[in-house]
Amino acid sequence: MLERVHVVGSGRAGGAIAARLRERGLAVTTGREADPNAELVILAVPDGKIAEVAQRTPPGPWVAHVSGATPLSALDPHRRRFSVHPLQTLTRDRGAEQLDGAWAAVTSETDEAAAQADWLARTLGVRPFPLADTDRALYHAGAAIASNYLVTLYRTAAGLLEQAGAPAEGLVPLMQRTIDNGFQLTGPIARGDWTTVDAHLRALHERAPEVEPLYRALAEATKP
């Protein structure tokens, strides 16, 4: 088990990770330059900065990044390396509890690295699963659709409700119940009510034409 960890990056991921590791009793340092006594250096920096930070990190400790899309080769020249990507959306407004119950993709190249990655994931309170380096882009696309595009869907739907004079906040319990129900499909497409779908399209064409292509694409993807 590692005891001294240095976290580079104090953004959403870095802040939550450092806070959780401190909760677990580890000696955690932060800052742009790695602590020479650290046994593990975690790079919680933007994807485009990982290679640059890795290159200036002195060799010796384990080095890991927490990106979902970036390959392990970005950690060159380090060979004691791995990645742990919490499959969770994180904000600056909350702390380490954001990690509770999340899953995490772990990528490693050796059995020793896999053990270290598994230890870090479980110390963070996330549930690890293996991810091949070659599958990162596909995996991260799925994560982006589930998280980022949920925001897009809410904002789009909220705009339509507001235009109709209805309270947009009423969508939140609806969306939450859809999740609680295990994503069971309901509504006009589920029951084959294409008359209602056509009515939606006519209304969008007349009053929100910029949304019509999105609705058509989602309807096509939603068909059983």
Image (spheres, rainbow, N blue to C red):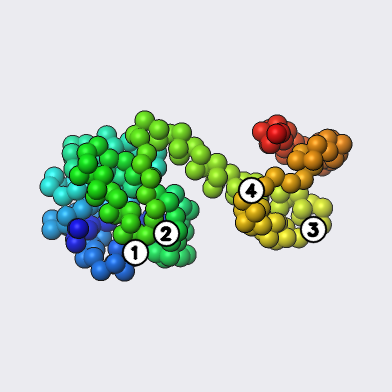
Crowding near pointer 4: few (<14 within 10 Å), some, many (20+)? Answer: few
C-alpha span from label 3 to label 1 = 41 Å
Q: Nearer the viewer, residue 101 or 38?
A: 101
Report whether 206 appears left or right of 179. Answer: right
The image's mark for residue 183 is: 4
The label nearer to you, 1 versus 4, is: 4
Q: Earlier in the sequence, mark 3 or mark 4?
A: 3
Label 1 residue SS: helix
- Real-space CA distance between mark 1 and mark 4, rounded to the nearest whole angstrom: 31 Å
Placement of 177 over or under 24, stated as above or below? above
- The quadrant holding residue 185 is top right
Q: Position of residue 67 (x, y in %)?
A: 37, 44
Amino acid found under the numbered disc labelled 1: Arg
> In the rendered structure, are the residues bearing label 3 and label 1 in contact, judged by CB atoms less than 8 Å apart?
no
Kindly identify the amino acid type of the residue bearing the numbered disc 3: Ala
Q: CA distance from mark 3 to mark 4?
A: 24 Å
Structural crowding at the residue carrying mark 1, measured as other residues with C-alpha within 10 Å and reported as few (<14), some (14–19) or many (≥20): many
Residue that numbered label 1 is attached to? 20
Check disc 3 and report the residue beneath it.
166
Badge 2 vs badge 1, beta-carbon distance below 8 Å: yes
Q: Dot 2, crowdedness within 10 Å: few (<14), some or many (≥20)? A: many
Residue under pointer 2:
99
Q: SS for tag 3?
A: loop
In the displayed structure image, the side of residue 13 where residue 78 appears, left or right: left
Q: CA distance from mark 2 to mark 1?
A: 8 Å
Is 139 displayed left or right of 47 in the figure? right
Q: Is residue 1 visible?
A: yes
